[in-house]
Amino acid sequence: MLEHKDRAVIVIDDEPAVLSLACDTLEAEGFTVFGVPEPGFIDSVCAELDAVLVLVDMVLPGEHGMKAAQRLREQFFPHAPMVAMSADQLTLLFARRSGLFQDTLLKPFDVQTLVDTVSAQAGRYVSVYSG
């Protein structure tokens, strides 16, 4: 358990290779990163953090990424930017139009695209969510 709230990038993805790549890449760029491998761990991890950005896979076991993001926005991170991740462009279009997400990442993504997206979004203040 964390002793205090940390400002962090949170990556939620059930694919171990994607989660590892994202976490390792962002840590190498100087971000504090917390990987969440399944929705069951979201509440316990996120309750301890002050996120500057949340990346959410849209296809998660047991809870759709859109629902997980909405819960995160309402319970933990009302003003942190969120980025939707998916291999399906239509899913990303719906995610973007939902108002929950400030950006999207099409999987598989290259390392530079991940770094550029996170760098552009991390720490931005989301003023209004109308979900």
Image: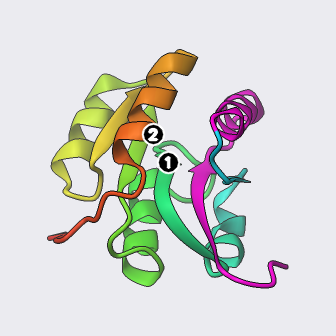
Residue type at tag 1: Leu
Q: Assign the C terminus to one quadrant of the image.
A: bottom left
Q: Position of residue 52 (x, y in %)?
A: 47, 61
N-terminal of the two: label 1 or label 2? 1
Q: Residue furthest right?
A: 1
Q: Which mark identifies residue 35?
A: none
Q: Position of residue 19 (x, y in %)?
A: 69, 37
Q: Which mark identifies residue 55?
A: 1
Depth check: 97 or 118 in front? 118
Crowd class of label 1 (few under 14; some 14 to 19; many from 20; radius 10 Å): many
What is the spatial separation of the Cα atoms under label 1 and label 2, in whole angstroms? 9 Å
The residue positioned 25% from the left and 65% from the top of the image is 126
Q: The magenta stretch spans which residues?
A: 1-29
Residue type at tag 2: Val
Q: Is residue 59 magenta?
A: no
The residue positioned 74% from the left and 34% from the top of the image is 24
Q: Assign the N terminus to one quadrant of the image.
A: bottom right
Direction from residue 109 to residue 125 in the image, left or right: left
Q: Is 65 rendered above or below residue 107?
A: below
Q: Element type at marker 2?
A: helix
The residue positioned 42% from the left and 73% from the top of the image is 77
Q: Position of residue 100 (x, y in %)?
A: 28, 58
Q: Mark 1 touching mark 2, by CB under 8 A? A: yes
